[in-house]
Image (tube, rainbow, N blue to C red):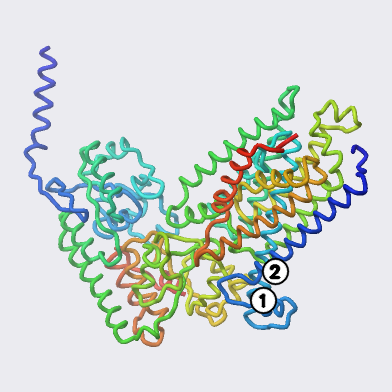
C-alpha cells in the first residue's frame, strides 16, 4: 500500500511539469482548434507531402521520412536529415504507421498536409483522441502554399521562417501572374501531363496532380471530367484528337521510350520537340508528391510553356530555391544533372 | 460422336451458324474502326485501310484503332476459348480462365514490373511469366499431392496459389510509391487496351494461335473429358495427359493476352455459357462459337470504353458491369446450362 502511494505521488509529481507547462492553441486549416505545447520538439509527418513541408520548414523537428530516401534523393538533401529513418505514413493512400509506433516516437505534434475533407478531419480527431498527441491538418492546395507555410511556422514556433518562405512563394506566384497577364488565352499552350509507365495516366482539371499545369498558364487538354477529379486513364486516340501543344512528364522511363513508341512519335508535340522531362530531385518539380516541392516547378513549367516570354534563369532560380527551401547549396555538377 | 463425324445436315447448320457469326463480327469490327474521338467517316476509314487516305487518318486507323480493335477481338476470343476449355476440363460451368491462378500470377508479375519502374515491354513480359509460372507451380504442387481426384486437388491448389499471389500483390501495393506507382498498378489491375500497339500484338498473336491449335485439333477428345476420367479411358483417351495439354494451351492463351490487356474478368466465364445456349454443350462447337462471341463481346465493350467519355473506362470494370448481371439472368433462366 505504501509502495502504491509512493508510486501515485511520484506519478503526480512527474505529471505536474507537463500540466504546468504553458500550452497555446492554434486553429488549423479545417477550423479545428488544437492545443499545442509551448515548444514543439518533434513532429510526426502523416505522409510524404507533410514530410516535405516539415523538412522545408524545420528539418530539426523531423522524426523521419514517410519512406526511406533513395541514394540519388539523399544527395540533394541536407545532412543529417537526408538519412533520417523511414517511419511510415498515417494517412493518404496506403497508411502504414501504426498508432502505437507513433506514440512510441513521442512526437509533440502530428502534421498532415493535403486534403481537409471530412474524412481527414475525422481521422485527425480520432488519432488525437486516441494518442493524446495534438494533430493539425493543413490545406495542401497549391494556391494555399503561402498560408500553409505561415500556419506551420506559427505552429512550430518559427514564424520568421514561415514568413520568409511564404513571401518567396508569393513572389513566385506574383511573377507567374505578371507573366500570364500579358498572354491572352489563345496563346496559352494546350498541355498534357503524362504519368505512368505508358504515359497514358493523367489528371483532369481540378486534379491535385495536374493543378500546377493550369497555374503555370497551360490549358489541360483533358478538360473537366464528368465524374471525379482525380487521376484517370486516357486513350491515345482521345489524346491524338486533343493534339496537345506541349507534353510534360516526370517519368524517366516513359520519356526514354517515347521516341521509339509508334504512338508517341506520331504526336505533334513529340515530333516538334515539345516533350519535356521535369527534374525530380530531391522531390518532383511538378508532382510526386503534390506538395510544396512544386513551387520550383512553377518556374520550370512557365519556361516550358512560354520559352520566348518567360525571362527566368532556371539555374539561378534553382540554386536560390534549393538554398532557401532545401537547405543545400547545389554544385555546378548537380545543377548540370538537374537541368540538362 | 466419338469419331468426330457429324451428320451432314448438322455439320452444315453448324458451319452456317459460324459463318453468320463471323460476318456479324467483321461488320462490328468495321463499325468499331469508324467510331472514336478522332472523327473519321466510313469512307475515310476504308480509304485509310487501303492506304489511300494518308496523313493523320492513316495514323489513327493503322496505329491506334486497328491494333486496338484487333487486340479487343483477340483478347476476347482468347479468354472465351480458354474459359470454354477450362469449363469442360473441370466439368464445371462456374470455372473461368483464372481458376488455376493465371490472372493472379500475371497480376503479381506486372505489379513487380511496375514496382521496379520497368518499361512497358518488361511489365508485359513479367505479367506473362507470372501467369505461366503460377500455373506451372499449381500443377507441380498438385501432382505432388497424392489424391484420387486430381481435378479437385488442382482447383484447390489453384485457389491457394491465387490467394498467395494476391497477398504478394497487395504487399507490393502497400510498399509502392502512392503518388507514382500505385495509380499505375491500380489501372493495370483493372485492365485496359488504351496503350496497345501493333508491336504489342506481335508476340501475342503467335502465342494465342499456338495455344489454340491443340485445342482445335483435340476438340473431340477434349469433349470426352466431360464424361469423367474412367469413361474417357474406356474410350481410349489418356485423360491425365490430355488434361495437362489443355491446361498448358489455355494457360498460354490467357497469360499472353492478360500480359498486354491487364486483368479482364468475366469474359471467360460468361461467354462459353452463351455459346452453349446457341450450339449446345459439345466442346467441338462451343470452342469456335465461344471464340467468335468473345471477340465480339470484348470488341463491343472496348468500343464503349474508348467512346463513352474522353477519359478511358477501365476494361475490367465494364466487362464486370455488363457480364455479372447477364450471368445472373442466365442463372435465373436456368435453361440448358450444362449437361
Determine which quarter of the picture holds residue A283. Answer: bottom left
The location of residue A309, given as percent across then percent down, is: 36, 87
Q: Both on one chain, marks 1 and 2? A: yes
Instruction: Compare marks 1 and 2 and give the one earlier in the sequence.
Output: 2
Query: Disc 1 and disc 2: Cα gap in Å?
Result: 8 Å
Identify the residue shown where x is 73% and y is 30%: B151
Q: Quadrant of the N terminus of chain A?
A: top left
Q: Is residue B291 left or right of residue A109?
A: right
The location of residue A224, given as percent across then percent down, is: 41, 68
Determine which quarter of the picture holds residue B272. Answer: top right
- The chain letter for the residue carrying disc 2 is B
Is residue B189 visible from the viewing direction of this image? no
Which SS class for mark 2? helix
Asked if labels 2 and 1 touch by Cβ distance under 8 angstroms, the answer is: yes
Other residues around mark 2 within 10 Å, as few (<14) / some (14–19) / many (≥20): some
Which SS class for mark 1? helix
Q: Can you tell which mark lies on residue B30?
A: 2
Q: Is residue A22 left or right of residue B114?
A: left
Identify the residue shown where x is 74% and y is 33%: B91
The location of residue A69, given as percent across then percent down, is: 41, 53
User: From the viewer's perspective, is residue B311 above or below residue A82?
Assistant: below
Identify the residue shown where x is 81% and y is 41%: B282
Q: Can you tell which mark lies on residue B42?
A: 1
Amino acid at each position: 500500500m505504501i509502495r502504491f502511494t509512493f508510486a501515485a505521488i511520484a506519478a503526480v509529481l512527474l505529471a505536474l511539469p507537463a500540466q504546468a507547462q504553458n500550452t497555446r492553441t492554434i486553429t488549423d486549416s479545417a477550423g479545428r482548434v488544437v492545443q499545442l505545447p509551448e515548444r514543439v520538439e518533434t513532429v510526426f509527418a502523416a505522409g510524404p507531402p507533410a514530410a516535405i513541408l516539415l523538412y522545408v520548414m524545420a528539418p530539426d523537428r523531423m522524426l523521419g521520412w514517410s519512406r526511406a530516401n533513395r541514394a540519388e534523393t539523399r544527395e540533394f538533401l541536407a545532412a543529417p536529415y537526408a538519412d533520417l529513418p523511414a517511419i511510415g505514413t498515417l494517412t493518404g493512400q496506403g497508411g502504414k504507421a501504426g498508432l502505437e509506433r507513433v506514440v512510441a516516437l513521442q512526437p509533440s505534434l502530428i502534421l498532415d498536409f493535403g486534403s481537409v475533407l471530412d474524412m481527414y478531419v475525422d481521422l485527425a480527431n480520432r488519432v488525437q483522441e486516441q494518442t493524446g498527441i495534438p494533430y493539425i491538418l493543413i490545406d495542401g492546395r497549391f494556391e494555399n502554399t503561402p498560408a500553409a507555410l505561415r500556419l506551420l511556422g506559427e505552429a512550430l514556433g518559427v514564424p520568421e521562417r514561415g514568413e520568409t518562405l511564404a513571401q518567396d512563394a508569393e513572389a513566385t506566384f506574383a511573377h507567374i501572374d505578371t507573366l500570364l497577364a500579358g498572354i491572352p488565352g489563345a496563346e496559352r499552350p494546350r498541355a498534357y501531363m503524362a504519368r505512368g509507365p505508358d504515359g497514358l495516366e493523367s489528371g483532369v482539371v481540378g486534379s491535385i496532380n495536374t493543378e500546377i499545369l493550369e497555374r503555370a498558364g497551360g490549358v489541360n487538354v483533358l478538360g473537366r471530367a464528368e465524374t471525379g477529379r482525380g487521376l484517370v486513364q486516357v486513350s491515345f486516340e482521345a489524346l491524338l484528337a486533343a493534339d496537345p501543344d506541349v507534353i510534360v512528364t516526370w517519368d524517366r522511363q516513359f520519356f526514354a521510350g517515347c521516341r521509339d513508341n509508334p504512338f508517341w512519335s506520331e504526336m505533334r508535340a513529340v515530333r516538334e520537340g515539345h516533350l519535356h522531362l521535369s527534374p525530380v530531385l530531391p522531390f518532383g518539380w511538378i508532382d510526386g508528391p503534390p506538395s510544396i516541392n512544386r513551387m520550383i516547378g512553377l518556374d520550370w513549367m512557365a519556361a516550358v510553356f512560354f520559352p520566348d516570354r518567360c525571362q527566368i534563369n532556371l539555374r539561378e532560380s534553382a540554386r536560390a530555391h534549393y538554398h532557401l527551401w532545401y537547405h543545400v547549396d547545389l554544385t555546378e555538377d548537380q545543377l548540370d544533372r538537374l537541368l540538362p | 460422336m466419338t469419331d468426330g463425324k457429324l451428320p451432314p445436315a448438322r455439320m452444315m447448320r453448324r458451319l452456317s451458324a459460324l459463318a453468320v457469326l463471323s460476318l456479324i463480327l467483321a461488320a462490328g469490327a468495321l463499325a468499331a474502326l469508324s467510331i472514336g474521338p478522332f472523327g473519321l467517316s466510313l469512307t475515310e476509314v476504308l480509304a485509310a485501310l487501303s492506304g489511300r487516305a494518308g496523313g493523320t487518318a492513316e495514323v489513327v486507323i493503322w496505329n491506334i484503332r486497328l491494333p486496338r480493335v484487333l487486340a479487343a477481338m483477340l483478347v476476347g476470343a482468347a479468354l472465351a476459348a480458354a474459359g470454354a476449355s477450362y469449363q469442360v476440363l473441370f466439368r464445371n460451368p462456374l470455372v473461368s480462365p483464372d481458376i488455376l491462378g493465371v490472372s493472379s500470377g500475371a497480376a503479381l508479375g506486372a505489379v513487380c514490373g511496375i514496382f521496379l519502374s520497368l518499361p512497358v515491354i518488361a511489365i508485359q513480359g513479367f505479367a506473362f511469366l507470372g501467369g505461366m509460372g503460377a500455373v506451372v507451380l499449381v500443377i507441380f504442387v498438385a501432382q505432388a499431392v497424392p489424391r484420387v481426384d486430381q481435378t479437385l486437388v488442382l482447383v484447390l491448389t489453384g485457389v491457394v496459389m491465387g490467394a498467395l499471389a494476391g497477398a504478394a500483390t497487395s504487399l507490393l501495393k502497400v510498399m509502392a510509391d502512392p503518388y507514382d506507382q500505385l495509380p499505375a498498378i491500380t489501372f493495370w489491375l483493372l485492365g485496359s487496351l488504351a496503350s496497345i500497339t501493333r508491336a504489342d500484338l506481335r508476340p501475342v498473336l503467335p502465342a494465342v494461335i499456338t495455344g489454340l491449335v491443340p485445342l482445335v485439333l483435340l476438340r473431340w477428345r477434349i469433349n470426352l473429358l466431360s464424361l469423367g476420367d474412367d469413361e474417357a479411358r474406356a474410350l481410349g483417351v489418356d485423360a491425365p495427359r490430355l488434361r495437362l495439354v489443355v491446361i498448358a494451351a489455355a494457360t498460354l492463351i490467357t497469360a499472353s493476352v492478360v500480359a498486354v490487356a491487364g486483368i479482364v474478368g468475366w469474359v471467360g466465364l460468361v461467354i462459353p455459357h452463351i455459346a452453349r445456349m446457341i450450339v449446345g454443350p459439345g466442346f467441338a462447337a462451343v470452342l469456335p462459337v465461344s471464340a467468335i462471341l468473345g471477340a465480339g463481346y470484348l470488341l463491343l465493350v472496348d468500343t464503349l470504353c474508348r467512346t463513352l467519355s474522353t477519359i478511358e473506362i477501365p476494361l475490367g470494370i465494364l466487362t464486370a458491369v455488363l457480364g455479372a448481371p447477364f450471368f445472373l439472368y442466365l442463372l435465373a433462366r436456368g435453361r440448358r446450362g450444362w449437361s
